[in-house]
Image: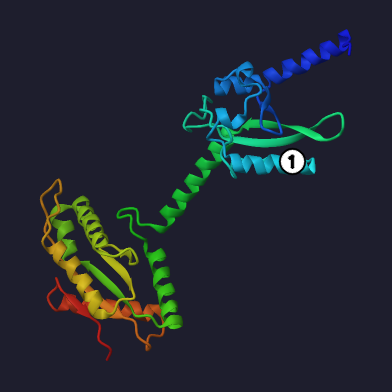
Amino acid sequence: MVINEREAQSFHWLVDMMESVEVGLVVLDLEFRVQAWNGFMENHSGITASKIRNRVLFELFPDIPEAWLTRKVDAVALLNTRAFTSWEQRPYLFRFRNTRPITGTENYMFQNLTISPLSGSTGQVEKVCLMVYDVTDVATGKRALERANQQLAKLSMTDQLTGLLNRGTWENLVDAEFERYRRYNQTTSLVMFDIDFFKKVNDNYGHLAGDEVIKHTATTAKSILRQSDSIGRYGGEEFGVVLPETDAEGARVICERIRESIEHSVVPTSVAPIRYTVSLGIAQLSDTGKSYMEWMQQADEALYAAKKGGRNRVIIFEQP
């Protein structure tokens, strides 16, 4: 077949466009042998078109998910229709290093992929074209926004000083645990505790030292609690703990560990080393409880009794 000058010129333009476009273009036969490999793919893979031509793609890129890509290509060839995947479904097909100057924080190039059927003269699909789009800028921006939103959500739920749940979030958990008890009747206990003579700590050593004592209390208590337990900073120097599937005596054991650990520890501050104690009140949830607020009030009454009884002690609320 003779190609005239105009056809030759058009073919030259087409090849030139394929080589210069900022999209990866890969043509494969149905045995996954590479038939075309444009400049984008050469630049990012370091493999020239002459070296890869007629080579099976998976031989040079063994990390490509062969079973997944085979299913995609088979469907495209069978149905004679395009298929698309985004970076959110699969971050990349080719693990290329990210070379974008603006989005250099990512380790690799995020890619969208289009797989298009290529039919021969008989109308049958003989090859497929993979179009690989670098969407690192978009992916990086979206991932950064998601991380920021997650951080904001976490900040809205936690106390800034201690990293514990804040009062509102923790109270919601108490409410949820109360409702769970009403439904399943599983034993559960609530603890309210605070730092003894905390005002004296602030008066004698200053508020910064007081903050260190609060943080030490939070860290110590959290290290003793189980993963299923929920601790929050209720306000000032007061804390609350939900102990699921724990009766009052079991809660006493946990509370004594917290009390003793704090009593025998020293908080190093820039002003002076500080020793202090805590008092703890426990209320086991019972069938007589009418609301989670009443449950919290019972734990608070037990805490008050611990304070009144001399501090640095654990008291269990007793039903009248």
Q: Quadrant of the N terminus?
A: top right
Q: Position of residue 313 (x, y in %)?
A: 15, 73
Res. 69 in view:
yes
- The extreme top residue here reads 5
Q: Residue at x 15, y 49 (%)?
A: 269
Q: Position of residue 37 (x, y in %)?
A: 66, 22
The quarter of the picture where residue 116 lies is top right
Q: Residue at x 33, y 71 (%)?
A: 242
Against 233, residue 35 (above or below) is above
Residue 278 appears in view: no
Callout 1 amino acid: Val
Q: Against 217, is 301 above or below? A: below
Q: What residue sits 22% from the left and 77% below the top?
A: 304
Q: Is residue 291 above or below residue 55?
A: below
Disc 1 crowd rating (10 Å Cα; few below 14, some 14-19, many 20+) is many
Q: Nearer the viewer, residue 78 or 249?
A: 78
In the structure shown, which secondary structural element does the residue marked by tag 1 occupy? helix
Q: Nearer the viewer, residue 157 or 146?
A: 146
Q: Residue 291 occupies which quadrant of the picture? A: bottom left
Q: Is residue 183 left or right of residue 37?
A: left
Q: Is residue 165 left or right of residue 74?
A: left
Q: Where's residue 161, x and y in %?
A: 30, 53
* Residue 45 locus on image (x, y percent): 56, 23
Residue at the image point whose x is 10% and y is 61% from the top: 264
Left or right of 153? Residue 255 is left
**From the image, which quarter does the C terminus lie in?**
bottom left
To which residue does mark 1 refer?
Answer: 76
